[in-house]
Amino acid sequence: MDPVRDTYGRPLRSLRISVTDRCNLRCEYCMPQEDYVWLERSALLSFEEITELATIFASAGVEKLRLTGGEPLLRRNLDRLVLLLAQVPGIRDLALTTNGLQLAQHAAAFRQAGLQRVTVSLDTLRPERFTALTRRTGHQRVLEGIAAAQAADFASVKINAVIMRGFNHDELADLVEFGRAHRAEVRFIEYMDVGGATRWSSAQVFSAAEMLRILAERYGPITPLAPHDSAAPAERYRLPDGVTFGIISSTTRPFCGSCDRARITADGMFFRCLYAHDGTDLKRLLRAQVAPDEILATLRRLWADRADRGAEDRLALKSRAPLFRVEDLKANPHHEMHTRGG
């Protein structure tokens, strides 16, 4: 089935599914304080409900699913959900984003269940910086998780690193070399002003242009690569020796024009944009036993009405501050990135 298209002609092809809002790290750019308003566990979608929604989204044209959190590996028996989703007709790509702390003990089971790709968040190679950023220990466990993912023979293993001026912008080449050594493509992400990034400031943003300049000084001319997928968030590049890496420049060079991603929170809220203030409660429809065809019609209508260009709207602001204040996050946990899946 052809995917439904929004007001700008953007198709609905990718769906990010949060399976929990809980996380075992407290990264400064995502979770700036220690006290949170958490979703009630009874409010979370069951694996069967997630699978039903994924099946409906596939009928609307979604081809790619990505499991997120919070930290998705905190959801028990997640390999069972992977097995269910791997059997959804029309889904050709099933991936997972994780902080890697528990990946070593689960990677093989996920691969066997049908997970195709894994992305691990690793912002620094220095254990002391990891602890300062996350307010937790466990750097070595993340490295072990990456090694286990490679051993499990996923179709690809990627590493996401949020780059912040004055914190880790001096590790660009180190992360590239780590990716080379571990056969994992590194994707550098500009620091974004969304969700729990309540301490964000433009001065902390280390731009894609700056990253490319630093890496070119180290390696020589860098070649832009044609995208495998025109809607992919990362622009990919190749170093003179053939090593590839990506940059997600959502802050300084938004890609709203090609965005084909939607999000479902762990309790079933549907968001059409990462920057959206409000979502639609799909769990209410499921638990009211609304027919799948009616839910599909609702999804198609909502996407057809989509006019979101959140990152571009933010870029156009003359005075740019974090998207939400701490008190806003406490009043509505769906504004948190660890709730809506980033």
Image (cartoon, rainbow, N blue to C red):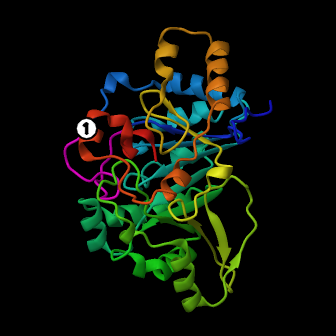
Q: In this view of the protein, which residue sits in the foreground, 145 or 121?
A: 121
The answer to whether 174 is drawn above or below residue 202 in the figure is below
Q: In this view of the protein, which residue sits in the foreground, 227 or 19?
A: 227
- Note whether residue 82 is visible: yes
Residue 212 position, x and y percent, is 57, 79
Residue 49 position, x and y percent, is 51, 22
Q: Which residues are magenta?
A: 21-37
Q: Residue at x 49, y 62 (%)?
A: 160
Q: Is residue 123 left or right of residue 136?
A: right
The answer to whether 222 is drawn above or below residue 204 in the figure is below
Secondary structure under badge 1?
helix
Quadrant location of residue 265? top left
Amino acid identity at mark 1: Lys
Q: Which residue is mark 1?
A: 330
The answer to whether 310 is drawn above or below residue 82 in the figure is below
Q: In this view of the protein, which residue sits in the foreground, 148 or 304?
A: 304
Quadrant location of residue 307? top right
Q: In this view of the protein, which residue sits in the foreground, 166 or 293?
A: 166
Magenta segment, prevailing SS (helix, strand or loop): loop
Q: Is residue 204 left or right of residue 310?
A: left
Is 56 colored magenta in this rendering?
A: no
Q: Residue at x 52, y 85 (%)?
A: 214
